[in-house]
Image (cartoon, coloured by chain):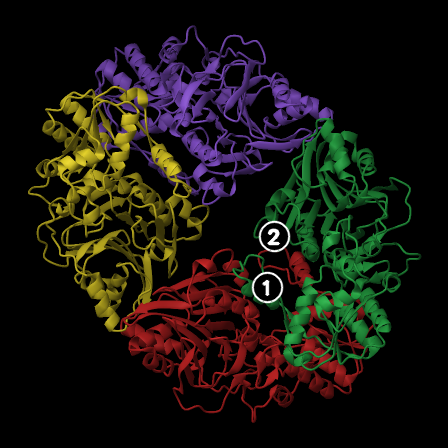
Chain colours: A yellow, B purple, C red, D green
Amino acid sequence: MCGIIGIENNNRAGALAVLGLMTLQHRGEESAGITISGKGALLTHKGMGLVSAVFARDVISSMPGTAAIGHVRYTTSSGSSLENAQPFYAKYEHGEIAVAHNGNITNFPKLRREFASKGALFAHSSDTEILLHLIAAAGGKPEHAVPAAVSRLEGAFSLVFLKGKTLIGARDADGFRPLILGKAGKSYILASESAAVEIIGGKCIREIKPCEIIIIENGKIKKSFLYKKPKKQNSCIFEQIYFSRPDSALFGKTVKESREELGRRLAKQMKHIKADIVMPVPDSGFFAAQGFSRESGIRFENGFVRNHYMGRSFIKPSQELRELAARLKLSVIKEVVKGKDIVVIDDSLVRGTTSRRIIRSLREAGANKIHLALSCPPVISPCYYGIDTPVKEQLISAQKTKEEIKKYLNADSVTFLSLDNLIKSCLGNAGGSPFCTACFTGKYPVKNKK
Amino acid sequence: MCGIIGIENNNRAGALAVLGLMTLQHRGEESAGITISGKGALLTHKGMGLVSAVFARDVISSMPGTAAIGHVRYTTSSGSSLENAQPFYAKYEHGEIAVAHNGNITNFPKLRREFASKGALFAHSSDTEILLHLIAAAGGKPEHAVPAAVSRLEGAFSLVFLKGKTLIGARDADGFRPLILGKAGKSYILASESAAVEIIGGKCIREIKPCEIIIIENGKIKKSFLYKKPKKQNSCIFEQIYFSRPDSALFGKTVKESREELGRRLAKQMKHIKADIVMPVPDSGFFAAQGFSRESGIRFENGFVRNHYMGRSFIKPSQELRELAARLKLSVIKEVVKGKDIVVIDDSLVRGTTSRRIIRSLREAGANKIHLALSCPPVISPCYYGIDTPVKEQLISAQKTKEEIKKYLNADSVTFLSLDNLIKSCLGNAGGSPFCTACFTGKYPVKNKK
Amino acid sequence: MCGIIGIENNNRAGALAVLGLMTLQHRGEESAGITISGKGALLTHKGMGLVSAVFARDVISSMPGTAAIGHVRYTTSSGSSLENAQPFYAKYEHGEIAVAHNGNITNFPKLRREFASKGALFAHSSDTEILLHLIAAAGGKPEHAVPAAVSRLEGAFSLVFLKGKTLIGARDADGFRPLILGKAGKSYILASESAAVEIIGGKCIREIKPCEIIIIENGKIKKSFLYKKPKKQNSCIFEQIYFSRPDSALFGKTVKESREELGRRLAKQMKHIKADIVMPVPDSGFFAAQGFSRESGIRFENGFVRNHYMGRSFIKPSQELRELAARLKLSVIKEVVKGKDIVVIDDSLVRGTTSRRIIRSLREAGANKIHLALSCPPVISPCYYGIDTPVKEQLISAQKTKEEIKKYLNADSVTFLSLDNLIKSCLGNAGGSPFCTACFTGKYPVKNKK
Amino acid sequence: MCGIIGIENNNRAGALAVLGLMTLQHRGEESAGITISGKGALLTHKGMGLVSAVFARDVISSMPGTAAIGHVRYTTSSGSSLENAQPFYAKYEHGEIAVAHNGNITNFPKLRREFASKGALFAHSSDTEILLHLIAAAGGKPEHAVPAAVSRLEGAFSLVFLKGKTLIGARDADGFRPLILGKAGKSYILASESAAVEIIGGKCIREIKPCEIIIIENGKIKKSFLYKKPKKQNSCIFEQIYFSRPDSALFGKTVKESREELGRRLAKQMKHIKADIVMPVPDSGFFAAQGFSRESGIRFENGFVRNHYMGRSFIKPSQELRELAARLKLSVIKEVVKGKDIVVIDDSLVRGTTSRRIIRSLREAGANKIHLALSCPPVISPCYYGIDTPVKEQLISAQKTKEEIKKYLNADSVTFLSLDNLIKSCLGNAGGSPFCTACFTGKYPVKNKK
């Protein structure tokens, strides 16, 4: 997961891009970067850590320009280093170009071999770099080069390019990762979430379509076209379950509304469960728990306090301190849970380790029965389209039966939202199912290639 | 406002103190520090910023010791600099001593003049330094020196001292600022909030009493006594309204429960108000809004998204960007508020500027009627006991009539919880009113001296 | 000017490379970097500033490996930024490769256009990057790729490559920049100066020849050959005049000896000059002044004190302070110069601004006659082979007559060593003239192309 | 050893003080600091490391003021930490005061006990802090307080104080450490060395006398008096031997001249020694070697290359690398020493470890006979007046006979300059012996107290 943004035709493009990245910060805390189109040259500043740290005092004011793209990167198992921070940049025959990418290019190894065999150099271990090679190989103006490059890609990608003052957006054929078009005054904006458009003062216009390329210049959409014939859409449904901000909208519904509906439908599935209170695991479970409470009539309680201040820097020198640090991240209000039968709502069950710790904390605090409810089906297959899910061997639902899971977690019951209920909750004005559900079903819309 | 902690008789005293400070981080984000009793010497590490930044990699592991005190400092108008970061430390005739202080010593100017006239040196601008002079002037063992020093102080103070491996706690005569005694295994803990005791694995025993000094050594309470005859208790009621974590307990009640009751009683005061939804200003208004909803039956909605990632470092080069940054801190979910009559619950109204901006955001998002409800009475007098409230001239309730306030905020109505309701909400097993309410009444328990 | 080093077959390759770079530090203080061949991958660490700053605590111990190359970079007018710090690195079809370069590739613009037109990407503004493209384009094993790449280059280059644990050296056809082969125990070393070989405990074997490529693996010279038929050698004679350490040897003579001879021959040229003392401009003029003194019998005096502590960071807020800071870099011992007739020996006269300031300081200190003697001829043409000389317009000897120069500098006389004397001084066991003297004659061995 | 400076009545006092500290940098590289008298308050900036690092970009321009004092601190065995960096500062009854100190207060432990028993607090482990207590205890105006404070001190001290815009200097009764009065334009300057006065554009007026206090305000000497009746002067003769810059003057002679004379007299003592060359250990041995050469007629050669770039940060992970790093600091030019009989001139022999390594390097480089000549007598007693000499047990001359020393160092002969010759060399226009020679004789002018 990552977050991307692009803004053009604005004297404060850099500062607005930083604000936009702050809005998208939850999509990636590992690194942040901005490329700005200054006087005749692209300037890039990137660094490890939060946007607020990377863009500390004076950085942005020393980078004047009227168009900018930005990127926040999620910690992935591979390569946590500055060299993988985006935007990526290169000079080539037709000048300078920069790109920021959210997703995962599944035919990257093949493309890389192809280019390497022609003598291309690679400076990064990230798949995004191949895009710059494809652009350079295609040559010519962006109108020509970007579609030529993008049509060679397979997998998941939402992209923003900066070439001079031209802002270009592109999205893969399945529409895995979101990309929103917005406008603020005379400036167009491209962003991973609608909230980023709105918070910097813009209005959302529409999503960029699967297979669409959009070329924006001087406050005008110069061109917008499909580089390939689109097929069924396969948008990642984890945006609604977990990734997106609740105030972002997807398929005509705010994520908040979708999550409430997840909770309502969970409640319907769990009619047989009796409980005193329903509690969300913060922050992602909040709206689902509220929906659950409204549907079931079971009293909503906020029995966890999440600590937002925990950095990654503190070294935990012993198992005991590691445990304490984990507990500090999510502490239980004893008086809320003591002696109570509780429905705990979490977004999903992946490895199971966090849920297990949460249930142990609740038991220590004196909870009576604990019913764990997940607002999605069992995750049984890894994602190849941009989410850093663990391999199958580490997915608890791929390795254990439901009974074993219940035992492992020490829960009184474990309920997963059905796939059908999940999809129905997230459909706004969309017909059919425009969602990728490969992680629940193992049916991948696009093959993963090595 | 500040947070303090002390731990003794524990090989991991330093690491546990850091975890404790992280639990108390909401009480002060400006600076953080720890003093540890190592081999024959006190070692101090402090720095500007969050605990997680100040105690980054390896710092704590290079500070072995079995007793520690710690401090987080709130940004106050005076002196945001490393020299004011605590704990404070000095060598004197009887060795080394360190102290961490939460509160405000009202007779500090007088004491300072007294000591200066005797030739004393001052290195800091903070009132806490006078304590070290008082200790040194008293001389002798801590059993003697601490009461001698502390009995000279007027105003608000909860204190933890470290002298060798001896941990000492002290509290002012009014009990303005909280100080909790807890135990984890064979170690005693002193902390500003019960949550800090519990999260590092301890159990709360009791509050340190007004006028009490407690001396702890090698896992034993060596001595505990009143240094002065206590009078009526005057604990700061803003701990319940705003400062303390919801999972901390005061006067036999969790802060969460007190806040819910604030909301219930607000609802009773506002029976005449009709609304579609009740919304908290996050995070402090949450439980009050929930209590309000339960009492009134008006639907609870979470219509704000708070951004926890905003640092202070980003320079806002223009009024427009400053506005955007403020909006980014607290954004509105349009779909929740559009066309709705809303009760907005905030903890208090001080200057009025934030509430005004919030109401403007709600209006822009299409809210219909907006009823602002505050879970305390009008703040009309500054605090001299440790809270950084503005001067009277900047307190909106001291300057404007309720009608003018409503107009200024552009609210359809503004309701303050009555003082009686406030006190009743926060009384757990306490009889009478053990609270200081000077900020609402102007009746100060202790004079402020210049 | 830059310094390069390579070491292989040594468990402490990284640490030795750092020591080697410290020995070469005088060749470039702008940036420093090391690439180490670790377990199956090349690791690079580089940064701005001195070697001792870039390789501060723990950096090198976290980079295990048995072969390493390193680079120190001189401040050039173009591009003082981390992106131009070397070694450069790329992945390509045949794995990873890193390169460090001393020199200037004169046909870089042409090569760059050629590669850009084929779709190549460029991440740096430095000419060194083209080497990686040439290697990748050549493909195959280094035995094949390096000569194919290097034979396309024109201009000045001494190169060290690291490919796995293979260390490769190469030198241009003119032999502009030095490159020494040495051995320490079972490890071969390549370095810009013999002193770097010796100080890390090795012995010098020979210079790498013009047109030579040497491939070293596991403590053995796997291959060594000429990639092109060599013509007359054109080694930069400024190595002896200024760049190299006095304890380095070139053409069978230590630089110290060559410099003394420069001074002796200067003295012979200046027999008509009467003076009380001869003084070097430290540190480069020292040995020449000593030679001058021995030849002429004029008393040697060290009348300047050079301040090695001046960083670049101190901001000089006014002309007056700038003057003081310049004076602080090189202060005069008044008592030495007062009332004296002085021969001042400096290495060369480029812009003339420093010499002018020095002479002013001497006059202020009460010197009587001041005879400036330069240990090389007038510099009248810029260098295209790796020295950052100013353009012709800023070369005082290209713009002014000798009489005008004397007047501008306010010297009583100005004497340049003759070209013939310069060359004879630096010839050790070399016959003919193996030197490039383009900066004195304007006759360039290799054309500079745009 | 430390360096101090003070400048008043100058709008660029801060910048000039920084330049002055750079001139004095050789006297202490551990920490640097400046206190400036700004608008109504003293501002201090200090840090660990070189002046150029501590006063990097923009620091000084953000500290306007017209008077300043500064300090560079030598690494002493005790307490290498920021808390001991000077100037020291305190607020007391009569306002703010800052002080910078060169020396060692021998009755510090007694004074400290005296003040501690009266309740004084100490924040530092340095003896300088007692001065602030003495000033505060004396009270009143500086004219009164400084002499009252200073007359209580025993031992070695040269001091500069800043109180508002008043600059005050003071020197101990023995005149152990130097303190020079100078003037630049309308500003008075106080500095540890005359070179610092001259380099920032001033002229030296005279030394501050033993027992003298000087009070300077608005470009005028307000007062200058002896706070005590002076006895015989005991200035540290190591200033001439080692500490001071060669361009500084003491007792009417430049240090350069004194050092030459040391060399001449050494030569006279060593008439029986035959040698091919005389070589200085750089940089302190240079002028003595030159004097030696002139007197003896033995050829002067510079056979060592000193590396000024070695920082302290590089971790030497093994004995072998430590050896290499030591060698890198001082490398031998083989061609100079091979087969030669050599006189090596060093300033002094303290522990003997460095000399031993130097002689080993010379032997490895092929030197034939090696005669070590020291420009002072054997050091047999530690210094209590501000030099960080090791304890007696580590002083080679206190532990071994001359024969044993020769053997340990592996020298062919070892010659020490006689005390008489040392004193005579350093006497300029001073009569008698104004020098402390306790380190050579064990006769201490002032008792050291614990």
Q: Is residue B311 left or right of residue C328?
A: left
The label shown at residue A176 is none
In this rendering, the answer to whether A172 lies above or below B389 is: below
Q: Position of residue A292 (x, y in %)?
A: 17, 27
Callout 1: SS: loop
Residue B411 visible in the shown view: no
x 71%, y 46%: residue: D69
The label shown at residue D49 is 2
Q: Is residue A191 left or right of residue D326?
A: left
**Lower position in the chain sequence, tag 1 or tag 2:** 2
Q: Chain of mark 1?
A: D
Of all residues shown, which one is farthest toward the right?
D432
x 69%, y 68%: residue: C357
Q: Is B62 in front, or is D226?
A: B62
Residue B238 visible in the shown view: yes
Do circles 1 and 2 both sit on a common chain? yes
Spatial separation of the CA atoms under disc 1 and disc 2: 14 Å
Q: Position of residue B57 (x, y in %)?
A: 45, 45
Q: Is residue A380 left or right of residue B250?
A: left
Q: Which residue is mark 1?
A: D309
In this rendering, the answer to whether A78 lies above or below A112 is: above
In this rendering, the answer to whether D113 lies above or below D427 is: above
The quarter of the picture where residue B212 lies is top right
